[in-house]
Image (cartoon, rainbow, N blue to C red):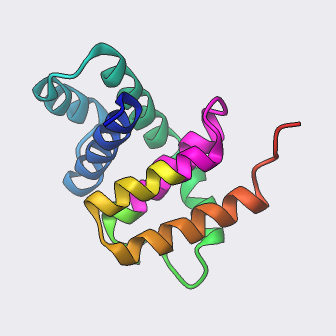
Amino acid sequence: MGSRRKSREIALQMLFQWEMGSHTPQHVISTFLPSQRLEADVEQFARTLFEGTVQAKESLDRSLSEHAQNWRLERMPAVDRNVLRLALYEMTHHPETPPAVVINEALEIVRRFSSEDSVEFVNGILDTIRKTTLVPKS
């Protein structure tokens, strides 16, 4: 597994712990990350994704709500909701990674942590956002 994927998976686990446990981001970082024994670059990218997603949660959730037709965020499975937040954050705040790569990574992660049905759901929402919201590079 590549280090970027590992970072994304760690960030997802942190988001899940943050949301489901109602912990502060600092608590999650200080209790979860040390136990993972990660390489410095993996830990740094995971932390960047986690902290950025938490900080941008309101705007991410607004965008996801607009594009998830007939789905309220609170009704989505927690893993799917957080994969969507994480991928949308990376697509909008880390333009060095092509959106297609971010979406592919999100689908692989959802396959591992959620269900096969979730793959189609997550792909549909992220692809719609990619096509309608993100400005292609010239």
- Left or right: residue 69 compared with residue 23: right
Does the segment drawn in magenta span residue 53? Answer: no
Does the segment drawn in magenta span residue 83? Answer: yes
- Left or right: residue 133 compared with residue 94: right
Picture coordinates of residue 36, whole percent (x, y): 15, 29
Picture coordinates of residue 25, whole percent (x, y): 31, 36
Query: Is residue 118 visible from the viewing direction of this image?
Result: yes
In the rendered image of this protein, does residue 103 appear above or below residue 30? below
In the rendered image of this protein, does residue 37 appear above or below residue 71? above
In the rendered image of this protein, does residue 129 appear above or below residue 43? below
Q: How many marks?
A: 0
Residue ID at (76%, 56%): 133
Magenta segment, principal secondary structure? helix
Picture coordinates of residue 61, whole percent (x, y): 54, 59
Residue ID at (39%, 64%): 80
Closer to the camera, 71 or 44? 44
Query: Is residue 73 visible from the viewing direction of this image?
Result: no
Closer to the camera, 100 or 30? 100
Quarter of the image with the N terminus is: top left
Q: Residue at the far top: name it.
A: 40
Residue ID at (58%, 68%): 125
Residue ID at (54%, 53%): 103
- Left or right: residue 15 compared with residue 103: left
Q: Dividing the picture into quarters, in which one does residue 42 lie?
A: top left
- Left or right: residue 126 compared with residue 50: right
Q: Residue at the far right: name it.
A: 138
In the rendered image of this protein, does residue 131 appear above or below residue 102? below
**Start-end of magenta stretch:** 81-103
